[in-house]
Image (tube, grey):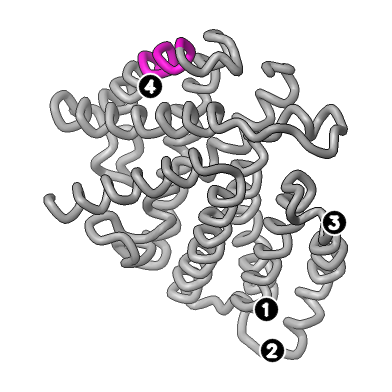
Amino acid sequence: MLERTITGVVFIAVLIGCILLGPYTFCGLFLLITLIGLNEFYSLSAKTGHQPAKVLGLLLGLLLFTGICSTFLPALSIIAYYPLALLFPLLFLVPIIELFRKKENPFANIALTYLGVFYVALPLTLLCMLSHIKNRFEGISTHPYSSHILLGFFFILWASDTGAYLAGKAFGRHKLFERISPKKTWEGTIGGAVLSLAVAWIVSRYFAIIGLSAWLVVSLIIVVFGTFGDLTESLLKRSADSKDSGSLLPGHGGILDRFDSLLLSVPFVFLYLAFTNSF
């Protein structure tokens, strides 16, 4: 328990520090997290008996992340869109390359190579876009970096996870999805929702970049899709017969274990804020 607590405190301190230092440190951190997460995904996939093209998948994730980030980070403007220009032909080369790999289950390998990029790299790229979401949809080339939407998102996400753990431990009786995650309960989910809504209200008082109603909706999105994200990663680990996605974070497992809730909640938060003009 002590090891888990120390790891959690250090991890949160590094994450918040990178957010506060600015877009380059934050995007740099999450580029690293993207590559580690992709490596974990492909390693778990290999344990299911399949052989996705790991190196190619890592390259696709790298190009997607850097290609998008280069469009709103001035220091990367010199390479703006070039990674994306390379990404698209490489996407169509995946099945061609599989022809020469001579592995079993070739179409499953192709699908898993794509899935890693879609499941891991795309959500983490969208996360980095959250601090620039307004200019992306207004067509403005640059926009001042704001840490508020990122900090608010993570505070609510952590509140949801903490509330679910505490309420589930104290009151958990009714299983939420026993086949996939025997420890998850409806009581825990409700507890997570209550605490995340309370934190969303507090966040709205200090981070007025969006209004209270928008923060509350973001909170509900995180609770619902974060829960599905947690269950999805549990399903992946069960398929691979693995307890954790990795061993990078002592007491927590791997990167996918730490960011499972985020991976499915970020895309829906992004879409909500983008199409409701909440900024």
The residue beneath circle 4 is 196
Give the main secondary structure, helix, strand or loop, of the magenta stretch: helix
The residue beneath circle 1 is 106
User: Does 208 lie within the magenta span?
Assistant: no
Local secondary structure at mark 3: loop
Of 186 and 220, which appears nearest the observer?
220
Give the mark, 3 or 2, whose residue is nearer the N terminus: 3
Q: Is residue 194 left or right of residue 145?
A: left
Q: Are marks 1 and 4 in contact (CB under 8 Å)?
A: no
Local secondary structure at mark 1: helix
Q: Are marks 2 and 1 in contact (CB under 8 Å)?
A: yes
Q: Where residue 256 sits in the image (x, y, percent)?
A: 43, 55
Q: For the residues marked 1 and 4, what is the alpha-carbon distance in whole angstroms?
A: 43 Å
Can you say whether 174 is above or below 93 in the image?
Answer: above
Q: For the residues marked 1 and 3, what is the alpha-carbon distance in whole angstroms?
A: 31 Å
Can you say whether 63 is above or below 206 in the image?
Answer: below
Q: Where residue 155 sits in the image (x, y, percent)?
A: 40, 29
Q: For the residues marked 3 and 2, what is the alpha-carbon distance in whole angstroms?
A: 30 Å
Can you say whether 162 is above or below 198 in the image?
Answer: below
Q: For the residues marked 4 and 3, what is the alpha-carbon distance in whole angstroms?
A: 37 Å
Question: Looking at numbered disc 2 in the image, what kind of residue is underneath it?
Answer: Arg
Question: Looking at numbered disc 3 in the image, what kind of residue is underneath it?
Answer: Tyr
* Viewer-nearest of discs 1 and 3: 3
Give the mark, 4 or 3, whose residue is nearer the N terminus: 3
| Marker disc for residue 101 | 2
Q: For the residues marked 2 and 1, what is the alpha-carbon distance in whole angstroms?
A: 9 Å
Residue stretch in magenta: 197-205
Of 212 and 167, which appears nearest the observer?
212
